[in-house]
Structures are given as C-alpha cells and as structure tokens.
Amino acid sequence: MKLVLRWFPYGDDSVSLKHIRQIPGVSGVATHLTRIPVGDVWSMEEINLVKDEINSYGLEMEVIESLNIHEDIKKGLPSRDMYIDNYIESMRNLSKAGVKCICYNFMPVMDWYRSNLYKDLPDGSNSMAYSHSEAVKLTLEKITSSMIDGSNNFSLPGWEPERFGQMAEDIKFYQNVSPEDYFRNIKYFLDAIMPAAEELDINFAVHPDDPPFPLFNLPKVVNNKESINTYLSLNASNRNGLTLCTGSLGAGIENDVVDIAKTFTSEGKVHFVHLRNVKHTSDYDFYESSHLSSEGDLDMFAIVKALYDNGFDGYIRPDHGRMIWGEVGRPGYGLYDRALGAAYINGLWEAVSKLS
Ligand code: DNO
C-alpha cells in the first residue's frame, strides 16, 4: 500500500508540497494537469513540469486524479475516436513519466456535487454536506453558482469553467440516452483503452458517482455493488478497476462498503482507495464527518482490514477533510484534517498488519 495526498499544481492549492512531505508515511501525490482542457493531449513537457516539481520535494507522481473523459466520448459522438486517440497518447506520456494508476469517472455532465460546501459542525469545524430533497429543487444555474461561489477562488475538481456553457444542453441530450446506450458508450471507451493500459502497465480506477443519487434524470453509472460489477464486467482486463471511494459509496445507505471492499479487492480490481467517513442525517442526506469510525456511519477499521486481508497493494489517499483550526482552502482539500486522516490510516494499517 502506498499513501498519497491529492495536490493541485500551478499555485492552485492552499497546501504546499513542502507540507505534504512532512506527513508521516505519505510517499507521493495524486495530481491533475488542471490547465489542459479536457480532451487535449497531456504533452511530455507539461507532465514533466509538474512531475519535476513534485519529485523535487522527494514525493512521487504515480497517481493521476483525474484524466478526465471528454463529454463526446460519454455521449458516443463520432468525434469520440479522436478524443480516445488523444486519451491514449496522454496515457503513453504519463507512463513514460512513471505513472502507475489513473483515476477517472464516467459521470455525465457533472462530477461530484454537494448542496452545502460549509456545513457548521457542533465542534466549530465545517465540512461539506448534501441534502437530496434540497438538491432536486435547485436549477442548474443555482447549482453551478453555489459551487463557484463556495470555491474560495480555487478551481474545483470536476467544475472546470469550460464545462459550464455546455451543461444545460448536455443535460437535455442525456434525456434521450438509455442506461443501455450509456453503458455501450462506456464499453466502447474501455475496449479502446484497455489494450494500451495492459501494454503500459497502468491501472485504471473508475470513481463512483458522488453522490450516488440521480439528479436531472442523468444516468447513474457506479453507485452500488451491482453497478460496480456491471462496469467492471464490461471489459475483463484487471486494469479495468475501481477507486473505492468509501464516502461516495457510503452515502448510499444500503451499500455495505466493507463487503464491497472485500469483494472487489479479492478480485484484484481495487487500484485506488479514497478513505473518508460520512454521517447520514436521513436516508438521502449526509455530511462528511472526520475520518474516525465513531464520528460517522462507516467502520473504517473493518474497511482497512478488508483491504489488507484481501491483498490490497494499490494507493490510498485520505479523502476530503473538514476545515478545522481556522484553515481556509479548497473545500474538502485543506491540510489539517486530511493530515489527521493520513495519520489515522497509518495507524489502522499498522494495526491490521500486526494483528494478522
Ligand atoms: C471530488 C473528487 C472527484 C474525483 C473524480 C474522479 O472531490 O472525489 O472530483 O476526483 O470524480 O474522476
């Protein structure tokens, strides 16, 4: 297992590599070339610029989160072949730079969403929260403006400004796309990239839909055990794997995250893990609690044990943290609470390994 932290380049992060390097056990960062528009090739020059900076702090760049998929691929448009070729070229360049794992998602139109980026918690900290009954009442404009306004002037992953102009039209487009059609588009993409993933020794780790509930009638892709199974069965390569995001899956109250961790780790399909906890306030409402088991609904010890016992040897990162100790940064991605999360993960991993 290797522990990494998510980090954004180009001065677009309140957290420095200098500080990340001081967190015990963290060997590298998961990063993303945010200034390259989705669909364009990640050139060697751009990749090496960021890699050299990361390496100069003694950290590795073995994980990319995310190499995003152009909407034309998701829609199955004729232009998808060109975007897939670009995607494979980016993979080749990333492999030359030593990248071993690529996290991505196949959510249509929007990546993750929270209806409240700053929910006050009783201990004086704040964290991100979601209320489905509130979210379904909102217009697309309200949703995008609340995400932009709450971003503290940092880019928000998955909410790149170039997407905004297209979103309304894309939502309309998907009203006529059946789940079967959508899964056919996914299969087309996976079948095209998996041979290159095999050749280049790169693991692919699809991120679950976050939150796992449908908005604007958009197709849901990966939100429970069954859909993970369907997704992974679309292409049998072991490179076609999962980002086990405990918080995204745990937001689905019926999901047994320990069982999901056991099942897919034992099949060799879990390549990347996002560890965080969630606390439900109703079946469809939750907030992101601290990582500790007793503060949320997930048994983090049992999840880590399931990974360890089933031979997990991929990457783990502490996922979103609360904002604590007055820190100001990108929602979910401050230093302090994620560093506490990293320390907790180190402790759980040491405990499960020594107990077995
Ligand atoms: C949000 C993240 C997501 C995730 C992507 C992966 O904070 O968990 O943006 O990185 O869905 O492609």
Image (tube, rainbow, N blue to C red):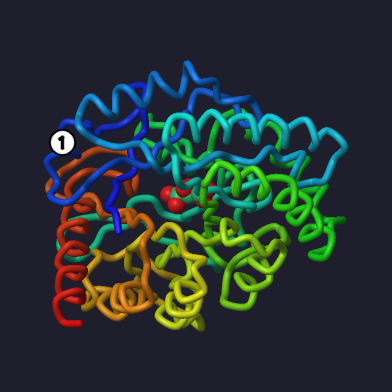
- Horizontally, is 132 left or right of 39 in the view? left
- Horizontally, is 185 left or right of 349 in the view? right
Establish whether ligand 1 lies closer than 8 Å to the Cβ of label 1: no
Q: Residue at x 24, y 64 (%)?
A: 290
Q: Residue at x 51, y 53 (%)?
A: 113
Image x and y of residue 36, in percent? 55, 24
Image x and y of residue 278, in percent? 35, 69
Q: Residue at x 52, y 74 (%)?
A: 267
Q: Residue at x 21, y 78 (%)?
A: 294
- Dividing the picture into quadrants, the one containing residue 63 is top left
Q: Is residue 33 above or below residue 346?
A: above
- Kindly give the residue lying farthest to the top in the view shown: 45
- Horizontally, is 165 left or right of 296 in the view? right
Q: Quadrant of the N terminus?
A: bottom left
Q: Is residue 187 above or below residue 27?
A: below
Q: Is residue 9 above or below residue 299?
A: above
The amino acid sitting under disc 1 is His
Q: Nearer the viewer, residue 195 or 258?
A: 195
Image x and y of residue 73, in percent? 75, 42
Q: Is residue 268 above or below residue 11?
A: below
Q: Nearer the viewer, residue 331 or 333?
A: 333
Q: Nearer the viewer, residue 170 or 24?
A: 24
- Kindly give the residue lying farthest to the front in the view shown: 199
Q: Nearer the viewer, residue 276 or 198?
A: 198
Classify mark 1: residues with Cα within 10 Å, few (<14), some (14-19) or many (20+). few
- Dividing the picture into quadrants, the one containing residue 19 is top left
> Label 1, on which residue?
19
Element type at marker 1? helix
Image x and y of residue 131, in percent? 48, 65
